[in-house]
Image (spheres, rainbow, N blue to C red):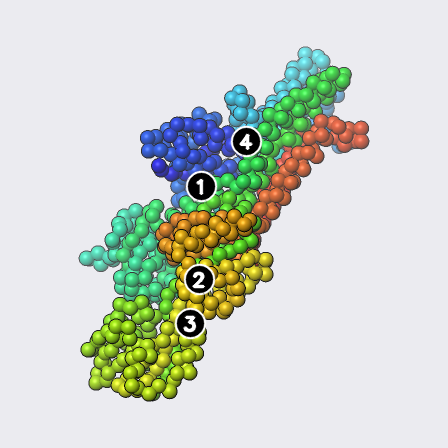
């Protein structure tokens, strides 16, 4: 099975995207296809026995243009739509003046007076409307093509409205030329022009607005440089990104961007990774640390080995995660899609019935046609088609910019229902690595010197606790006679002094006046390391897994939102209770095996709880997959991130609050969009039919096209509000 994102051009409403999606899913060799109207993309899972060219042909067969494979670095094609809009916007002024000056008591152009020179009047308006037909030919062609294929969409409604009003007016122009001057009252060329102009204007504004929702993706793509400094035998050489191979040694100088994902082999520097992690403070990186493409080197000369390039890089993975999520469907969006698929055929029937009923009631052909055209134009389901996909793409883009990768849009809807969050402890509520939490210095050395002695001795050890001292080795000391004492600690010699590091057993017969300090450290959940120089205790160090600095405030705010918090850990009860007490978590379940974690999640969900699981390790993967929403961190194990629905790229646990906020506001925004889209059609269609005519409330095709454009813009601007969601 393979995946690909292809471009689909020519879609204008949800009926279009629904048709392409259904058509593709029926084809042999395609496992699953999801079409995104906003991005103009088809996200496709397909079998190995077909190729991308074949899928492209399927897209063409569905009635739309295949635009090739999506390339995140492809530059936008030159767009002349703004120029055409301006020119035709200027041209509409004389058209409206000629056709309506007599109605609003403005001076009439003498040789175009409709009563004195009806032929001049009719021919002039007919000729002036032709540029608009040419400008809107894509809408007309697409609409008629889809009608013939029985795949009516929004373009079908517009095309029928435009063609009916133009053909009717053109026939009347012929009759005027033949001497029937009475038909001069039945010309609607200006409506034809205004419908096309308003539709094109609406689509232009809509397109520009939707482009803003892709900012997160574009910014991710643009952060990586186009070239790199390659280290060679002859010195530095500038090469393009495409020339870099895995294993190459590259150089990044202060102020430069890292070209590809890699591992530092020489030097150290502070790197700005805010573009991907959301962390504003530069992070110090040194030998053996990983660095990401696009991060900025602030202050050091660094050599690094190329590890991940091209589609395997962190940036490419993020881009495709965002796109994959944007191309997935929320349950609520499927409802809107289903309604849209039935909506257009129903409107065609209503328009036809309106025309027939008016004729039966004895009204003129002219009035019957006008009401039919108005119904066709006013009912275009543009806003309905935009309601959900635009909100989804906007929210997923916003999330990515805030350091939250959401794998499917369905996750956004589920987020608004979460009432229970289960946290793993190690690596989730804590940093997952041992650190010095507190130490007592009983020596004449300053703190740095004492810790440097300990760090030099511990650097010889393979014990996990030794890693707590990695950052405290500030100078090299010659360590000799190193020996490990099983279950007790280690001993070594520096210079002419003997050192002993270990638990209380290492004291042997040494007098210990510091038992109270040891008890304080033990009560706080620390592992104890005594530091002995010759026969004197010179230090007492507490080592433990440190709680994440933002964990306590995050737990507190989640509880304030009414969310039940549970700690589910395989660690022992004493340590779990110490962490739980500090974080004010009341529900703590310790000594739990991975399989028991999954059973517990299932039990919670069986009782009606909507559960999200937060974890980072291999043992959390089954639980992450079992819960409604699995949340992991970028630093988590591969299996954990693969099993989760949400990845927090900056390892900042308070992003969970941001994610839940985005989920709730997205669902609310979609409901608002759907309400106004349905409300607009329910309100405007009866007015277009003429139900309220006796109350003086009626509209013509020109006003219908303007109101349809405004309804779509309301939905667009409402969805774009999601770009300004706060972090709380």
Sequence-wise, the earlier of marks 3 and 1 is: 1
Q: Is residue 17 left or right of residue 173?
A: left
Q: Which residue is mark 1?
A: 76
The residue furthest top is 178
Of mark 4 and mark 3, the one earlier in the sequence is: 4
Residue 578 in the image: state x and y as whole percent: 46, 69
Camera-near label (4 vs 1) is: 4
Residue at x 63%, y 26% (from the top left corner): 347
Give me the C-alpha separation between circle 3 and circle 1. Answer: 58 Å
Q: Residue at x 44, y 66 (%)?
A: 573
The secondary element bearing badge 1 is classed as: loop
Q: Nearer the viewer, residue 80 or 704?
A: 704
Of 207 and 291, nearer the camera is 291
Classify 270 as above or below 412: below
* Disc 4: which residue: 15
Q: Judge whether residue 368 can be spotted in this image.
A: yes
On the image, the x and y values in percent for residue 446 come to 35, 83
Q: Label 2 vs label 3: CA separation?
A: 15 Å
Q: Are the residues tagged 1 and 2 within 8 Å (C-beta)?
A: no
Query: Which disc, if any, is residue 8?
Result: none
Give whichever of 610, 691 is nearer the camera: 610
Image x and y of residue 106, in percent: 75, 32
Q: CA distance from mark 1 to mark 2?
A: 55 Å
Q: Which residue is mark 3?
A: 525
Residue underneath mark 2: 590
The C terminus: image quadrant? bottom right
Query: What is the spatial separation of the Cα atoms under label 4 and label 1, in whole angstroms?
Result: 26 Å
Q: Is residue 674 above or below residue 658?
A: above
Identify whether 37 is placed above or below 397: above
């Amino acid at each position: 099975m393979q995946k690909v994102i292809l471009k689909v051009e020519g879609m204008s409403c949800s009926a279009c995207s629904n048709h392409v999606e259904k058509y593709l899913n029926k084809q042999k060799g395609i496992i699953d296809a999801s079409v995104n109207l906003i991005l103009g993309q088809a996200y496709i899972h397909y079998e190995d026995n077909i190729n991308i060219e074949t899928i492209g042909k399927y897209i063409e067969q569905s009635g739309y243009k295949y635009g090739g494979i999506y390339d995140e670095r492809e530059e936008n094609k030159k767009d002349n739509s703004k120029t055409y809009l301006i020119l035709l916007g200027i041209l509409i002024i004389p058209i409206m003046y000629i056709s309506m000056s007599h109605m609003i008591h403005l001076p009439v152009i003498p040789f175009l007076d409709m009563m004195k020179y009806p032929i001049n009047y009719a021919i002039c308006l007919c000729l002036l409307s032709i540029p608009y037909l040419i400008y809107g030919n894509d809408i007309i062609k697409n609409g008629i093509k889809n009608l013939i294929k029985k795949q009516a969409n929004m373009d079908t409604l517009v095309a029928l409205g435009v063609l009916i009003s133009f053909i009717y007016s053109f026939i009347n122009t012929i009759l005027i030329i033949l001497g029937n001057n009475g038909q001069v009252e039945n010309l609607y060329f200006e409506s034809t022009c205004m419908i096309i102009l308003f539709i094109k204007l609406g689509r232009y504004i809509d397109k520009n607005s939707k482009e803003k929702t892709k900012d997160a993706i574009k910014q991710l793509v643009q952060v990586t440089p186009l070239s790199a400094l390659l280290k060679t035998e002859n010195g530095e050489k500038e090469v393009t990104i495409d020339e870099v191979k895995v294993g190459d040694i590259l150089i990044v100088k202060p102020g430069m961007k890292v070209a590809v994902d890699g591992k530092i082999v020489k030097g150290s520097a502070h790197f700005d990774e805010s573009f991907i992690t959301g962390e504003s403070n530069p992070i110090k990186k040194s030998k053996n640390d990983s660095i990401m493409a696009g991060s900025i080197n602030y202050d050091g000369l660094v050599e690094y080995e190329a590890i991940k390039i091209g589609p395997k890089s962190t940036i490419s993975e993020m881009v495709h995660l965002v796109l994959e999520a944007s191309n997935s469907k929320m349950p609520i969006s499927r409802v809107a899609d289903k309604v849209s698929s039935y909506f257009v055929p129903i409107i065609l029937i209503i328009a036809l019935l309106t025309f027939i009923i008016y004729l039966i009631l004895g009204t003129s052909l002219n009035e019957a046609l006008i009401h039919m055209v108005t119904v066709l134009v006013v009912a275009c389901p543009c806003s309905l088609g935009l309601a959900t996909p635009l909100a989804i793409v906007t929210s997923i883009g916003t999330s990515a910019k805030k350091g939250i990768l959401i794998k499917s849009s369905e996750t956004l809807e589920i987020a608004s229902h979460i009432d229970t969050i289960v946290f793993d402890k190690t690596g989730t509520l804590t940093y997952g690595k041992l650190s010095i939490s507190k130490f007592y210095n009983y020596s004449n050395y300053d703190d740095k010197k004492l810790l440097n002695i300990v760090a030099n001795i511990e650097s010889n050890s393979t014990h996990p606790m030794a890693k707590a001292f990695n950052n405290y080795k500030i100078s090299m000391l010659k360590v000799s006679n190193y020996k490990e004492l099983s279950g007790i600690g280690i001993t070594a010699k520096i210079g002419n002094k003997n050192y002993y590091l270990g638990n209380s057993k290492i004291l042997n017969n040494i007098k210990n006046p510091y038992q109270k300090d040891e008890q304080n450290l033990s009560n706080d959940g620390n592992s104890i390391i005594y530091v002995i120089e010759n026969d004197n205790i010179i230090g007492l160090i507490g080592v433990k897994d440190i709680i994440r600095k933002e964990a306590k405030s995050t737990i507190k705010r989640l509880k304030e939102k009414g969310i039940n918090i549970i700690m589910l850990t395989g660690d022992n009860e004493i340590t779990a209770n110490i962490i739980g007490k500090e974080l004010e978590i009341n529900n703590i379940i310790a000594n739990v095996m991975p399989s028991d974690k999954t059973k517990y999640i299932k039990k919670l969900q069986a009782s009606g709880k909507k559960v999200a699981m937060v974890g980072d390790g291999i043992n959390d993967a089954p639980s992450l997959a079992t819960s409604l929403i699995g949340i992991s961190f970028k630093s988590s194990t591969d299996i954990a991130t693969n099993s989760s629905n949400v990845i927090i790229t900056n390892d900042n646990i308070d992003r969970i609050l941001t994610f839940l906020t985005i989920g709730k506001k997205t669902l609310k925004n979609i409901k608002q969009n759907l309400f106004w889209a349905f409300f607009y059609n329910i309100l405007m269609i009866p007015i277009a039919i003429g139900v309220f005519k006796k109350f003086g409330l009626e509209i013509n095709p020109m006003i219908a096209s303007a109101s349809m454009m405004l309804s779509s813009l309301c939905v667009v601007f409402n969805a774009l509000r999601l770009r300004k969601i706060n972090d709380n």
